[in-house]
Image: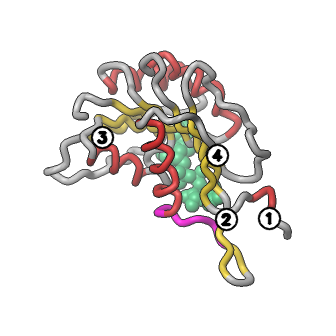
Amino acid sequence: MSSHRALILGGTGMLSGVTRWLAGQGWHVVVPSRRYCPIPVDDDVPGRVRWIEARWERPERLAQDAARALGGKADLVVSWVHSAYRVPVLNAVAGLLVEDGPVVEVHGGSISPGEPRPALTGHPTQRVVLGYVREGASTRWLTHAEIVDGVLVAVRRALADRPRTEHHVGEPVSHHAH
Ligand SMILES: NC(=O)c1ccc[n+]([C@@H]2O[C@H](COP(=O)([O-])OP(=O)(O)OC[C@H]3O[C@@H](n4cnc5c(N)ncnc54)[C@H](OP(=O)(O)O)[C@@H]3O)[C@@H](O)[C@H]2O)c1
């Protein structure tokens, strides 16, 4: 797996555990974000993580810099990009992916089943929808560990070339009666 490359949009925030997991599997992972955020990996970990400075507001520039840091086509894109930037950013990085390379799109908040549609129709997309957790009479957001575990289920499914699916982590926000 050591020649595999991944681009993780939002990979320095709550998805940093996904970044570390892929590096642990021998992947070369590129994480674009605004604030300098090296993601440490142990010396005995076969993969590596490259942070690059980039912003969703400049998607073409982000794609150019990510291409250079990847050093070859990406085998996987994982995306946690806020809705206003999701489509332009994913369109800009589409050309960095290998043909038929999978995308894992993470969505949060209140969304309808099946919506929004995958941004890159030419690539198999696993959708992850983040919800909430009910604990007795109260509810809480998912922890980062729960989010990472849920996204990794979708990542493994994407890498196993399984049919596209929607993965719900927690209960959907849209069905949450306040
Ligand atoms: N259902 C749920 O459980 C649920 C749903 C949504 C959110 N949450 C919670 O809410 C918290 C906050 O969410 P968050 O969206 O701030 O997630 P986050 O993953 O903590 O941060 C967003 C990621 O995107 C990057 N980013 C943000 N704006 C960017 C921009 N304009 N250009 C480039 N990169 C950008 C950030 O790095 P930079 O800031 O360095 O750019 C970071 O890597 C999460 O940590 C989570 O716990 C929970």
- Whether the magenta-drawn stretch holds residue 48 is answered as no
Q: For the residues carrying marks 2 and 3, which lies nearer the camera in this image? A: 2
Q: For the residues carrying marks 3 and 1, which lies nearer the camera in this image? A: 1
Q: Residues within 10 Å of mark 4 (few under 14, many from 20)?
A: many
Q: Earlier in the sequence, mark 4 or mark 3?
A: 3
Q: Secondary structure at mark 1?
A: loop
Per the image, the residue denoted by label 2 is 132
- Three-letter code for the amino acid on which mark 4 is drawn: His
Is residue 120 among the parts visible in the rendering? Answer: yes
Per the image, the residue denoted by label 4 is 107
Q: Residue 68 occupies which quadrant of the picture? A: top left
Per the image, the residue denoted by label 1 is 176
Q: Earlier in the sequence, mark 4 or mark 1?
A: 4
Residue numbers of the magenta segment: 140-145
> What whole-number distance in Å separates the C-alpha atoms at marks 2 and 3?
30 Å
- Three-letter code for the amino acid on which mark 3 is drawn: Val
Q: Secondary structure at mark 2?
A: strand
Q: Earlier in the sequence, mark 2 or mark 3?
A: 3
> What whole-number distance in Å separates the C-alpha atoms at marks 2 and 4?
13 Å
Per the image, the residue denoted by label 3 is 49
